[in-house]
Protein backbone atom coordinates (compact mmCIF):
# COMPACT_ATOMS: atom_id res chain seq x y z
CA UNK A 1 0.00 0.00 0.00
CA UNK A 2 1.18 3.52 -0.78
CA UNK A 3 0.49 6.70 1.11
CA UNK A 4 -2.35 8.36 -0.78
CA UNK A 5 -1.40 11.73 0.76
CA UNK A 6 1.77 11.71 -1.35
CA UNK A 7 0.02 10.93 -4.64
CA UNK A 8 -2.18 12.63 -7.24
CA UNK A 9 -4.66 10.54 -9.23
CA UNK A 10 -4.95 11.75 -12.84
CA UNK A 11 -7.96 11.42 -15.12
CA UNK A 12 -6.43 8.33 -16.71
CA UNK A 13 -6.32 6.55 -13.36
CA UNK A 14 -2.55 6.94 -13.17
CA UNK A 15 -1.06 7.81 -9.80
CA UNK A 16 1.73 10.37 -9.87
CA UNK A 17 4.00 10.81 -6.88
CA UNK A 18 4.01 14.36 -5.60
CA UNK A 19 7.58 13.93 -4.36
CA UNK A 20 6.93 15.40 -0.92
CA UNK A 21 10.15 16.20 0.92
CA UNK A 22 11.12 14.17 3.95
CA UNK A 23 11.32 15.61 7.43
CA UNK A 24 15.13 15.31 7.34
CA UNK A 25 15.41 17.37 4.17
CA UNK A 26 13.03 19.99 5.56
CA UNK A 27 15.07 20.18 8.77
CA UNK A 28 18.25 20.76 6.82
CA UNK A 29 16.69 23.46 4.65
CA UNK A 30 15.16 25.02 7.76
CA UNK A 31 18.54 25.24 9.51
CA UNK A 32 20.04 26.90 6.45
CA UNK A 33 17.12 29.34 6.27
CA UNK A 34 17.47 30.06 9.96
CA UNK A 35 21.04 31.12 9.32
CA UNK A 36 20.21 32.96 6.10
CA UNK A 37 17.42 35.02 7.62
CA UNK A 38 18.18 34.92 11.33
CA UNK A 39 21.73 36.28 11.24
CA UNK A 40 20.85 39.34 9.09
CA UNK A 41 17.81 39.92 11.31
CA UNK A 42 19.99 39.98 14.44
CA UNK A 43 22.43 42.37 12.75
CA UNK A 44 19.56 44.65 11.66
CA UNK A 45 18.06 44.65 15.16
CA UNK A 46 21.46 45.45 16.70
CA UNK A 47 22.01 48.29 14.24
CA UNK A 48 18.59 49.77 14.97
CA UNK A 49 19.19 49.48 18.71
CA UNK A 50 22.49 51.35 18.50
CA UNK A 51 21.03 54.05 16.26
CA UNK A 52 17.61 54.69 17.84
CA UNK A 53 17.59 53.38 21.42
CA UNK A 54 19.92 56.09 22.83
CA UNK A 55 17.57 58.77 21.48
CA UNK A 56 14.22 57.27 22.55
CA UNK A 57 13.81 53.96 24.37
CA UNK A 58 10.18 53.39 23.28
CA UNK A 59 10.95 54.27 19.68
CA UNK A 60 13.98 52.01 19.83
CA UNK A 61 11.93 49.01 20.95
CA UNK A 62 9.29 49.67 18.28
CA UNK A 63 11.97 50.00 15.62
CA UNK A 64 13.61 46.73 16.66
CA UNK A 65 10.27 44.91 16.48
CA UNK A 66 9.64 46.40 13.04
CA UNK A 67 13.10 45.37 11.85
CA UNK A 68 12.53 41.83 13.12
CA UNK A 69 9.16 41.57 11.35
CA UNK A 70 10.60 42.86 8.09
CA UNK A 71 13.62 40.53 8.13
CA UNK A 72 11.86 37.42 9.43
CA UNK A 73 8.39 37.70 7.84
CA UNK A 74 8.32 40.07 4.87
CA UNK A 75 11.72 39.31 3.35
CA UNK A 76 11.25 35.48 3.35
CA UNK A 77 7.73 35.90 1.93
CA UNK A 78 8.99 38.13 -0.88
CA UNK A 79 11.89 35.80 -1.66
CA UNK A 80 9.57 32.78 -1.72
CA UNK A 81 7.09 34.58 -3.99
CA UNK A 82 9.68 35.87 -6.47
CA UNK A 83 11.49 32.52 -6.67
CA UNK A 84 8.23 30.53 -6.93
CA UNK A 85 8.65 28.62 -3.68
CA UNK A 86 12.40 28.60 -3.23
CA UNK A 87 14.50 29.94 -0.36
CA UNK A 88 18.26 29.83 0.33
CA UNK A 89 17.88 26.63 2.33
CA UNK A 90 15.48 24.94 -0.08
CA UNK A 91 17.62 25.95 -3.05
CA UNK A 92 20.65 24.32 -1.40
CA UNK A 93 18.93 20.98 -0.74
CA UNK A 94 16.76 20.91 -3.88
CA UNK A 95 13.27 21.66 -2.55
CA UNK A 96 10.41 23.92 -3.60
CA UNK A 97 7.21 24.91 -1.81
CA UNK A 98 4.08 24.38 -3.92
CA UNK A 99 0.34 24.42 -3.35
CA UNK A 100 -1.43 21.20 -2.41
CA UNK A 101 -2.52 20.83 -6.06
CA UNK A 102 1.08 21.22 -7.27
CA UNK A 103 0.73 24.81 -8.49
CA UNK A 104 3.08 27.70 -7.67
CA UNK A 105 2.61 29.62 -4.44
CA UNK A 106 1.46 33.24 -4.34
CA UNK A 107 2.36 36.00 -1.88
CA UNK A 108 -0.64 35.04 0.25
CA UNK A 109 0.69 31.50 0.68
CA UNK A 110 4.24 32.71 1.32
CA UNK A 111 3.16 35.39 3.81
CA UNK A 112 1.02 32.92 5.76
CA UNK A 113 3.92 30.48 5.99
CA UNK A 114 6.34 33.21 7.09
CA UNK A 115 3.95 34.65 9.65
CA UNK A 116 3.32 31.28 11.28
CA UNK A 117 7.02 30.46 10.97
CA UNK A 118 7.77 33.44 13.20
CA UNK A 119 6.43 31.32 16.06
CA UNK A 120 7.07 27.72 15.06
CA UNK A 121 10.51 28.26 13.53
CA UNK A 122 12.14 31.25 15.19
CA UNK A 123 10.09 31.29 18.39
CA UNK A 124 10.78 27.63 19.22
CA UNK A 125 14.02 27.21 17.21
CA UNK A 126 12.19 24.80 14.91
CA UNK A 127 11.12 22.33 17.58
CA UNK A 128 7.40 22.89 17.03
CA UNK A 129 7.77 22.69 13.25
CA UNK A 130 9.80 19.47 13.49
CA UNK A 131 7.27 17.84 15.80
CA UNK A 132 4.29 18.71 13.60
CA UNK A 133 6.15 17.65 10.43
CA UNK A 134 6.91 14.21 11.86
CA UNK A 135 3.24 13.63 12.70
CA UNK A 136 1.66 15.11 9.55
CA UNK A 137 1.24 13.94 5.96
CA UNK A 138 3.80 15.23 3.44
CA UNK A 139 5.93 16.46 6.37
CA UNK A 140 3.85 19.62 6.66
CA UNK A 141 4.40 22.17 9.39
CA UNK A 142 1.68 24.43 10.79
CA UNK A 143 2.39 27.14 8.22
CA UNK A 144 1.89 24.66 5.39
CA UNK A 145 -1.39 23.43 6.85
CA UNK A 146 -2.79 26.95 7.10
CA UNK A 147 -1.49 28.05 3.70
CA UNK A 148 -2.38 24.82 1.85
CA UNK A 149 1.19 24.10 0.73
CA UNK A 150 3.92 21.49 1.08
CA UNK A 151 7.62 21.13 0.23
CA UNK A 152 8.35 19.13 -2.92
CA UNK A 153 11.61 17.52 -4.00
CA UNK A 154 13.12 19.04 -7.13
CA UNK A 155 16.08 16.68 -7.40
CA UNK A 156 15.94 12.94 -7.84
CA UNK A 157 12.30 13.01 -8.98
CA UNK A 158 10.96 9.98 -10.78
CA UNK A 159 10.77 10.20 -14.55
CA UNK A 160 7.38 10.21 -16.19
CA UNK A 161 6.22 6.91 -17.65
CA UNK A 162 6.39 6.62 -21.45
CA UNK A 163 3.02 6.93 -23.22
CA UNK A 164 1.14 3.75 -24.09
CA UNK A 165 1.28 3.06 -27.82
CA UNK A 166 -1.68 1.68 -29.77
CA UNK A 167 -0.90 -1.72 -31.36
CA UNK A 168 -1.49 -1.05 -35.09
CA UNK A 169 -3.34 -4.30 -35.71
CA UNK A 170 -5.88 -3.46 -32.97
CA UNK A 171 -6.51 0.19 -33.89
CA UNK A 172 -9.62 -0.59 -35.95
CA UNK A 173 -11.13 -2.78 -33.23
CA UNK A 174 -10.39 -0.30 -30.45
CA UNK A 175 -11.86 2.65 -32.36
CA UNK A 176 -15.27 0.94 -32.61
CA UNK A 177 -15.26 -0.88 -29.26
CA UNK A 178 -17.53 0.21 -26.42
CA UNK A 179 -15.19 0.95 -23.50
CA UNK A 180 -16.95 1.60 -20.21
CA UNK A 181 -15.39 3.65 -17.43
CA UNK A 182 -12.58 1.63 -15.88
CA UNK A 183 -12.10 1.49 -12.11
CA UNK A 184 -9.17 3.69 -11.11
CA UNK A 185 -7.37 0.80 -9.44
CA UNK A 186 -7.63 -1.41 -12.50
CA UNK A 187 -6.47 1.33 -14.89
CA UNK A 188 -3.53 2.11 -12.64
CA UNK A 189 -2.53 -1.54 -12.32
CA UNK A 190 -2.65 -2.02 -16.10
CA UNK A 191 -0.60 1.13 -16.65
CA UNK A 192 2.07 0.08 -14.16
CA UNK A 193 2.15 -3.43 -15.59
CA UNK A 194 2.87 -2.20 -19.12
CA UNK A 195 5.61 0.10 -17.84
CA UNK A 196 7.36 -2.66 -15.89
CA UNK A 197 6.54 -5.73 -17.95
CA UNK A 198 10.07 -6.04 -19.33
CA UNK A 199 11.47 -6.34 -15.81
CA UNK A 200 9.12 -9.15 -14.74
CA UNK A 201 9.80 -12.87 -14.79
CA UNK A 202 8.30 -14.41 -17.92
CA UNK A 203 5.94 -16.64 -15.98
CA UNK A 204 4.72 -13.85 -13.73
CA UNK A 205 4.41 -11.52 -16.72
CA UNK A 206 2.22 -13.97 -18.59
CA UNK A 207 -0.01 -14.64 -15.58
CA UNK A 208 -0.47 -10.93 -14.85
CA UNK A 209 -1.18 -10.12 -18.47
CA UNK A 210 -3.84 -12.82 -18.67
CA UNK A 211 -5.45 -11.77 -15.40
CA UNK A 212 -5.54 -8.06 -16.27
CA UNK A 213 -6.81 -8.61 -19.81
CA UNK A 214 -9.57 -10.81 -18.42
CA UNK A 215 -10.63 -8.08 -15.99
CA UNK A 216 -10.53 -5.47 -18.77
CA UNK A 217 -12.72 -7.66 -20.97
CA UNK A 218 -15.60 -7.07 -18.53
CA UNK A 219 -15.60 -3.38 -19.51
CA UNK A 220 -15.02 -3.73 -23.26
CA UNK A 221 -17.36 -4.96 -25.99
CA UNK A 222 -16.98 -6.63 -28.38
CA UNK A 223 -14.05 -8.80 -27.38
CA UNK A 224 -10.78 -8.33 -29.28
CA UNK A 225 -10.06 -10.56 -32.28
CA UNK A 226 -9.22 -14.18 -31.55
CA UNK A 227 -5.57 -14.78 -30.83
CA UNK A 228 -4.92 -11.26 -29.53
CA UNK A 229 -2.01 -11.15 -27.11
CA UNK A 230 -3.17 -10.05 -23.63
CA UNK A 231 -0.56 -7.27 -23.43
CA UNK A 232 -1.62 -5.90 -26.81
CA UNK A 233 -5.24 -5.90 -25.67
CA UNK A 234 -4.33 -3.96 -22.50
CA UNK A 235 -2.31 -1.42 -24.47
CA UNK A 236 -5.08 -0.94 -27.03
CA UNK A 237 -7.73 -0.29 -24.39
CA UNK A 238 -5.60 2.22 -22.46
CA UNK A 239 -4.44 4.03 -25.61
CA UNK A 240 -7.97 4.30 -27.01
CA UNK A 241 -9.28 5.46 -23.65
CA UNK A 242 -6.63 8.19 -23.56
CA UNK A 243 -7.45 9.29 -27.11
CA UNK A 244 -11.17 9.54 -26.36
CA UNK A 245 -10.61 11.53 -23.18
CA UNK A 246 -8.24 13.86 -25.05
CA UNK A 247 -10.86 14.44 -27.76
CA UNK A 248 -13.56 15.12 -25.17
CA UNK A 249 -11.35 17.66 -23.42
CA UNK A 250 -10.51 19.33 -26.73
CA UNK A 251 -14.20 19.69 -27.59
CA UNK A 252 -14.91 21.03 -24.11
CA UNK A 253 -12.16 23.63 -24.44
CA UNK A 254 -13.37 24.68 -27.90
CA UNK A 255 -16.93 25.02 -26.63
CA UNK A 256 -15.78 27.13 -23.68
CA UNK A 257 -13.74 29.36 -25.99
CA UNK A 258 -16.76 29.84 -28.27
CA UNK A 259 -19.02 30.73 -25.37
CA UNK A 260 -16.47 33.26 -24.12
CA UNK A 261 -16.26 34.83 -27.57
CA UNK A 262 -20.05 35.12 -27.83
CA UNK A 263 -20.27 36.60 -24.36
CA UNK A 264 -17.87 39.35 -25.41
CA UNK A 265 -20.22 40.62 -28.13
CA UNK A 266 -23.61 42.32 -28.05
CA UNK A 267 -26.80 40.45 -29.10
CA UNK A 268 -27.15 39.52 -32.78
CA UNK A 269 -23.36 39.41 -33.18
CA UNK A 270 -22.94 43.20 -33.29
CA UNK A 271 -19.43 44.08 -32.04
CA UNK A 272 -19.24 46.34 -29.05
CA UNK A 273 -18.46 49.97 -29.85
CA UNK A 274 -14.99 51.23 -29.05
CA UNK A 275 -15.13 54.13 -26.61
Image (spheres, helix red, strand yellow):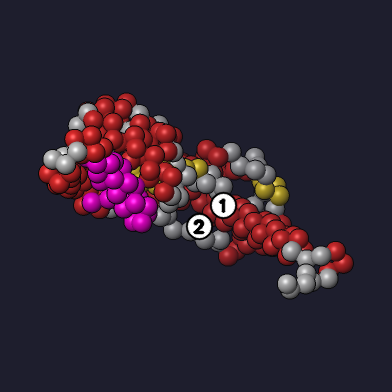
Which residue corresponds to the image point at 67% horizontal and 44% vertical from the top-left? 180
Image location (x, y in percent) of residue 55: 16, 41
Furthest residue in direction front, as rendered? 55
Q: In this view, does 152 lie to the left or right of 251?
A: left
Per the image, label 2 sits on a secondary structure element best described as loop
Q: In which quarter of the image is residue 112?
A: top left
Magenta part of the chain: 63-88
Furthest residue in direction bottom, as rendered? 274
State yes or no: residue 67 in magenta. yes
Question: Does any portion of residue 187 appear in the rendered image?
Answer: yes
Q: Do the residues labelled 1 and 2 touch (CB within 8 Å)?
A: yes
* Res 164 label: 2
Give the answer, above or below, for where 170 lies relative to 153.
below
Which residue corresponds to the image point at 60% horizontal and 63% vertical from the top-left? 169
State yes or no: residue 34 in magenta. no
Give the answer, above or below, for where 95 lies relative to 139.
below
3D distance between C-alphas at marks 1 and 2: 7 Å
Instruction: Return the residue nearer the eye: 7 or 216.
Output: 7
User: Callout 1: few (<14), some (14-19), or many (20+) C-alpha neighbours within 10 Å?
Assistant: many
Is the C terminus in the top left, top right, bottom left or bottom right quadrant? bottom right
Per the image, label 1 sits on a secondary structure element best described as helix
Amino acid sequence: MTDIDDEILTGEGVVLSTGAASVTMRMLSGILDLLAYGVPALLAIAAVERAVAPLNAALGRASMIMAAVVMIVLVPALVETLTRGRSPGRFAVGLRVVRDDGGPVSFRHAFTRSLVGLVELFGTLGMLAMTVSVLSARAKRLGDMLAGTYAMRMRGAKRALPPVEMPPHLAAWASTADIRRLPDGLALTCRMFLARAHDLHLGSRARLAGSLSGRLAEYVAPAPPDGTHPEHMIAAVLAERRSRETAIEARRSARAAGESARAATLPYGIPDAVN
